[in-house]
Image: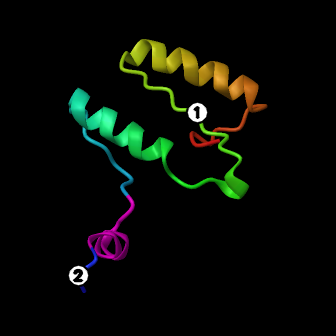
Amino acid sequence: MSNETIKSLLNRRSIRKYKNDEIKLEDLETILDVGKRSPTGMNQQPLLFVVLKDDRFRDKMNVLMEKAKNGSTDPFY
């Protein structure tokens, strides 16, 4: 198999535990750029990416998001 995209898709895995290491800015920009180009249902493009680097701000945002989601604890809502 020579197609790198197919290799990547076949070898992908889900990560359930993350390190506390900071992501390099260049890598973060690449990840966000790829995410912006990803396909969406019926090309509606309802994407919103928020990058939070400060733990205190992230915790406050989680509280606000739980209120907005009617108490749902799903972090990917």
Residue at screen point 37% across, 71% down = 9
Q: CA distance from mark 2 to mark 1?
A: 33 Å
| Vertical order, 21 against 59 (above or below) | below
Residue 37 vs 3, above or below: the answer is above
Q: Nearer the viewer, residue 43 or 72?
A: 43
Judge left or right: residue 32 versus residue 62. Answer: left
The quadrant of the rendering that contains the N terminus is bottom left
Q: Which mark is residue 48?
A: 1
Q: Is residue 8 magenta?
A: yes
Where residue 36 sits in the image (x, y, percent)? Answer: 49, 41
Residue found at the far bottom of this picture: 1
Amino acid type, mark 1:
Leu
Q: Is residue 46 left or right of residue 17?
A: right
Q: How many marks?
A: 2
Query: Measured from the top left, where is residue 48 in percent x and y?
Result: 58, 33
Q: Secondary structure at mark 2?
A: loop
- Identify the residue position indicated by label 2 in the image: 2
Residue 47 lies in what quarter of the image?
Answer: top right
The stretch of residues the image draws in magenta is 4-14
Image-based side of 6 in relation to 66, left or right: left
Measuring 21% from the left and 33% from the top, which residue is drawn there? 21
Tag 2: amino acid: Ser
| Nearer to me, 59 or 22 | 22
Q: Is residue 23 visible?
A: no
Of the numbered discs in the image, which one, if any, rests on residue 33?
none
Q: Is residue 33 above or below residue 70?
A: below
